[in-house]
Amino acid sequence: MKQSPMKYRVLAAALLVLVPAASTLAAEPAEGARSHRGMHGGLERFDTDGDGRISRAEFDKASAEREARMAQHPERAERAGKKQHAPLDFNALDANRDGYVVRSEVTAYHERMRPQREAERQARFDERFKTADLNKDGKLSRVEVDEHMGRLADRFAWIDENRDGFLTRAELAAGRDRR
């Protein structure tokens, strides 16, 4: 049975496309590449030896690498600095002082910090609301939102529950909680 040359060409073209794609998908991440092992790729990325805990050396190395990346991209560092919390402190994370940080210690740290972070978030919101409220009437009109809170502009009608054409602090808080 004789095969047509066209079939060979199609098969060859398919192999030329699929083989590099398959090898790319199967490749391990390069050294230093971000590997998101957990849901969010958080502190577990610092665990370079994969033992389920972060040593002081791993923590310091990852922190130094992050600072170096931020130094290479000052615009990112500036943007991150606006909403960035104080840098993590190994000693604050290592609650049992065994020289390692494990997941339960990170979770406990975040729970301890929740009230402070909520207060910081509320202060940022209050400042943004105050800045946007040009006429100081305690509510934001469509114009005020468009000028100072552009990310909310396309959801204005959705957030304005009572359809009065203004967003109050309560409506904004309810809108934030619905997300």
Image (cartoon, rainbow, N blue to C red):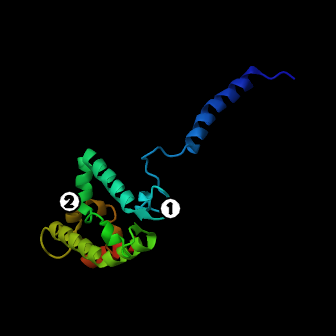
- Measure the alpha-carbon separation of dots 1 and 2: 50 Å
Q: Position of residue 172 (x, y in %)?
A: 29, 73
Q: Earlier in the sequence, mark 1 or mark 2?
A: 1
Q: Position of residue 74 (x, y in %)?
A: 23, 48
Foreground: disc 1 or disc 2: 1
Rendered residue at 72%/24% (across/down)? 8
Do we see residue 164 in this rendering? no
Residue that mark 1 sits on: 51
Label 2 SS: helix
Q: How many residues crowd mark 1 within 10 Å: few (<14), some (14–19), many (20+)? A: few
Task: Please name whichever residue, 100 or 175, is drawn nearer the observer in this view of the structure.
Answer: 100
Q: Amino acid at mark 1?
A: Asp
Residue that mark 2 sits on: 147
Res. 111 image quadrant: bottom left
Rendered residue at 39%/57% (across/down)? 58
Do we see residue 174 in this rendering? yes
